[in-house]
């Protein structure tokens, strides 16, 4: 179970990084918008970070996701 949990976190991190880059935002800019620290954004993008911080980054990018078959699915951007 822990392995599945980490792979899900890693997948979310990759999606957040992709969303940030597609909007041409730096990690610093996303951190300001999300109201979190730049190191927190770095942690999220490699599969770390706290759930509340991940949620802040998702909201700052205007993304809506769900989880299906153990993988994140972008529902809307």
Image (spheres, rainbow, N blue to C red):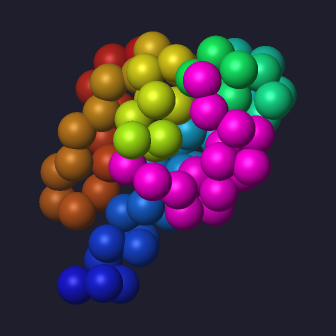
Q: Specify start and end residues of the magenta stretch as a single range.
A: 35-51
Q: In the rendered view, does 5 fall on the left or right side of 40?
A: left
**Horizontal arrangement in the rendering, residue 1 relative to residue 25 (left or right):** left
Q: Nearer the viewer, residue 5 or 31?
A: 31
**Residue 22 falls in which quadrant of the image?**
top right
Judge by depth and name the residue closer to the eye, 7 or 29.
29
Image quarter (top left, top right, bottom left or bottom right) of the N terminus: bottom left
Residue 47 image position (x, y, % from top left):
54, 62
**Which corner quadrant holds the C terminus?**
top left
Judge whether residue 68 can be spotted in this image.
yes
Residue occupying image coordinates x 33% and y 18%: 76
Residue 54: horizontal and vertical position, in percent? Answer: 46, 42
The image position of residue 62, as x and y in percent, is 45, 15
Q: Is residue 13 rendered to the left or right of residue 20? A: left
Q: Toward the viewer: 60 or 71?
A: 60
Residue for point 64% across, 16% down: 33
Looking at the image, is 30 positioned above or below residue 9?
above
Q: Is residue 13 above or below residue 10?
A: above
Task: State left or right for residue 3 relative to residue 57.
Answer: left
Taking the magenta stretch, the answer to whether it contains residue 57 is no
- Would residue 45 be seen by someone viewing this image from the given angle? no
Corner quadrant of residue 26: top right
Residue at the image point whose x is 81% and y is 29% from the top: 28
43 is within the stretch colored magenta: yes
* Direction left: furthest residue: 69
Count of numbered badges drawn on the protein: 0
Q: Is residue 12 above or below residue 76?
A: below
Residue occupying the point 77% across, 34% down? 27
Query: Residue 40: x percent and y percent?
Result: 65, 48
């Amino acid at each position: 179970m822990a392995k599945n949990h980490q792979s899900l976190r890693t997948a979310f991190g990759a999606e957040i990084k992709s969303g940030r880059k597609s909007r041409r935002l730096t990690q610093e800019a996303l951190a300001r918008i999300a109201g979190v620290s730049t190191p927190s954004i770095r942690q999220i993008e490699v599969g770390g970070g706290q759930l509340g911080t991940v949620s802040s980054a998702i909201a700052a990018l205007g993304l809506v996701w769900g989880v299906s078959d153990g993988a994140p699915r972008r529902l809307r951007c």
